[in-house]
Amino acid sequence: MNKKRLLMSLLVCCLSTLCKGSDSAFLYGVENRVDWKDFLSRHDLVWEKTPRSYFDAPFVGNGLLGAMLYMPEGEALRLDVGSTEVVERRDTEARSIVDNGRLPVGYFEFASTYPIDRVTGRLDLYNAQTRFNLRTKKKQSLQLDLKVLRNRDVIVLEYDSPADADGYWVFRPAMSVVPRLPMKGSAHLNPAAEMKVINNVNVAIQNRDAGGCYVTAWKEVKLSEGRKRLLVTIQDSYPDHSAINKAVDLIDSFASERVMAQEGKAHTEWWNNYYTASFVSIPHPQMESLYWGLQYKLASMMRKGAPLCDLMGPWYKSTTWPGIWFNLNTQMLFSSLHISNQMELASTLHDFIYANEENLINSIPQQWRHNAAGLVRCTGKDQIEPVFEWPNAEYPERSNLIYLMYYMWEHYRVSMDDRYLEEQFFPLLKRAANFILNVVTTDESGVIHIPESHSPEAIYDTDTNYDLSSLRWACTTLLVIDDRLHIGDKQRAEWKRVLKKLVPFPADENGYMASAHHKAPLGHRHWCHLFQIYPYALINYDQPENRLLIMRSLQHWGSPSIPNTWTQAVISSMFSYQQKGEEALKHLELALNTSNLSANFTHSEGKNPCSETYGGLSRMLQDMLLQSWGNKIRIFPGVSGSWREAVFYQLRAEGGFLVSAGRKNGTTDWINIHSLAGEPCIVEHNFDAPFTVKGVKYKRLDERRVRLYLEKGGTALLYTGDEGKKITPVIVSNGNYNNYGLRK
């Protein structure tokens, strides 16, 4: 062997020892030993009892199509199907969630020789498919497998159908009407679906009065050894009817077993790889199961190129909220994805906003369109609703776009894509800020005030803390961007003046108020009067002079009695931001045990699905493990002392860092940080023992903080004790895993 080949062989050997797989490419001195299939199996949803409704059904989805399997009491087994792109297209004076709200598709009903009397099985997270056992009243056992292909819009259901227990599926189209609108005769009801067979493919063509149609197409294929396969797709087109041929052709293409095998393999590979973007394991089996179940659910709800995820995701249920909400819901839904390193899913928010930027401008009054934009509370998929119609023309919600852009800012900060910052984010944030700056007033003392507006779900008043915190954050951020990019924007002096002269956040003896004239809303789920604390962190733990006010505000409002899942999750995050791990854990427990989080971890209010909670619950755990606001990476800042062990791998931090860390015996054991952008890096490490730093020059700032001089592409390892750290799941002896589904 010549020297060159020998050196190459040694290099490959060293790299393979260092990395232990492609998912560990940025680890230095740490070995990733996660067996993903085994690990995720302990979080599979398990049904030992028959699912009876939407709220306890196994669910599958690919970001566009969704399906649920359950058997209502006294009824046949059914497969509900839905699509996020199936919406109304009416052009009336009704609000846009009616004009363009989600429409139901329908369901398939199972007809068999002998009735089914029990349905049990498992949702396999790792492979994104369900496997269920159907027991007939004759004690026959039939296996059923269900998935929605990730890369092709086809629902695939395979099931046993032996000669002595034959079965088939019958499609039942739903009435085509947006349920939020009370029906007056048939004024807003589309015509009945037209059932046909085209090229041996069954189709249900649902025409819309407003134009176009949506089509459900299906075909049953006999397989060997008493098995059948049901193939289903849903296609939508507007204003034409091209969905018909598209649906038929797609189902027809899956007559080929080669295509089926190829797409099935691609589906499995996508999901297997998806999870490995980051890793989290904690000594709390229920929360760990929920976190990983939610990672599955979030990916089932959204994908690149699909419509923006609404309050339902791809699974349809009759609801009074058949659209997209922007005064909390979308913001919270997208609050965790960039931290869990799921950047492609997170980018679907940016795709939607910038594709609809012109509509954001046109949604505000004509006199401000030259320099401003706004975001209405709720809308259909095309964002066409005037801001001054929700909740009313006199008191609009002025800060919704700024609030949304906070999470888009976090997304930028964990990637540090300056081209995106300059070309897209900065111009739109200017417009969002100008929507308020165009109407501020100055009193005789030179103090700047914000006129009447609505503080979401709470009060109408001037100087709401929702608006004040949002405007202050926007102006602060615009100045940061202007400095970074050396723009010298002509509004720079105005932003500085606002930060100097804007009225202080209204407060009283109980902490921060809702607005200038209204106290904090006790027992209320929405915390927008405290946005200056969380998520904006304008008032924060690193300001000792503000700590008492923060705690007074939080203790006054953050009641354990608020019966809302995401509210308790937010309270937990707020305590994590104050480094109070015991209180954070207390409210985590309250969040997990609220009545509106169901067996398949669907969150609902009044039986109306609410997708925002999935992001909020995920962010709650992330805030315990890692925070990076204020140009500082904090390791395990909100972890309870009762969590003696914890580990996370490749979560993203502001500044463009991939951060991994392990906790052992109640303290930080090791930290691994990889720089994607070469930004300054200060780490609050929470080591309780002497530690070693390898791979980088560093400076100890004090007992809690160290500065790492990481270049782009560099990796640092900080650790106590011996080398040879490993990433493995936390094991809780006698832990109750597989928490969700229906257990006996």
Image: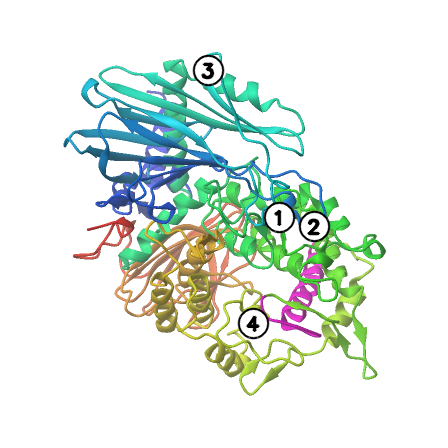
Q: CA distance from mark 2 to mark 3?
A: 39 Å
Earlier residue among tags 1 and 2:
1
Earlier residue among tags 3 and 1:
1
- The amino acid type, in three-letter code, at marker 4 is Leu
Mark 3 — residue? 252
Earlier residue among tags 1 and 4:
1
Mark 1 — residue? 97
Question: Is mark 1 in CB contact (under 8 Å) with mark 2?
Answer: yes
* Residue 446 shows in this picture: yes
Name the residue: 54% across, 40% down. 103
Question: Which residue of the protein is positioned furthest toward the bottom in this rendering?
Answer: 509
- The amino acid type, in three-letter code, at marker 2 is Glu
At numbered mark 3, what does the secondary structure look like: helix, strand or loop? Answer: helix
In the drawing, does residue 280 fall left or right of residue 153?
Answer: left
Mark 4 — residue? 530
At numbered mark 2, what does the secondary structure look like: helix, strand or loop? Answer: loop
Spot occupied by residue 188 in the image (x, y as percentages of width and height): 62, 41
Spot occupied by residue 337 in the image (x, y as percentages of width and height): 48, 49
Q: CA distance from mark 1 to mark 4?
A: 29 Å
Closest to the observer, 92 or 740: 92
Mark 2 — residue? 385
Q: Where 221 falls versus 604 (above or below)?
A: above
Question: To which quarter of the image does residue 371 belong?
Answer: bottom right
Indicate the quadrant containing the N terminus: top left, top right, bottom left or bottom right.
top left
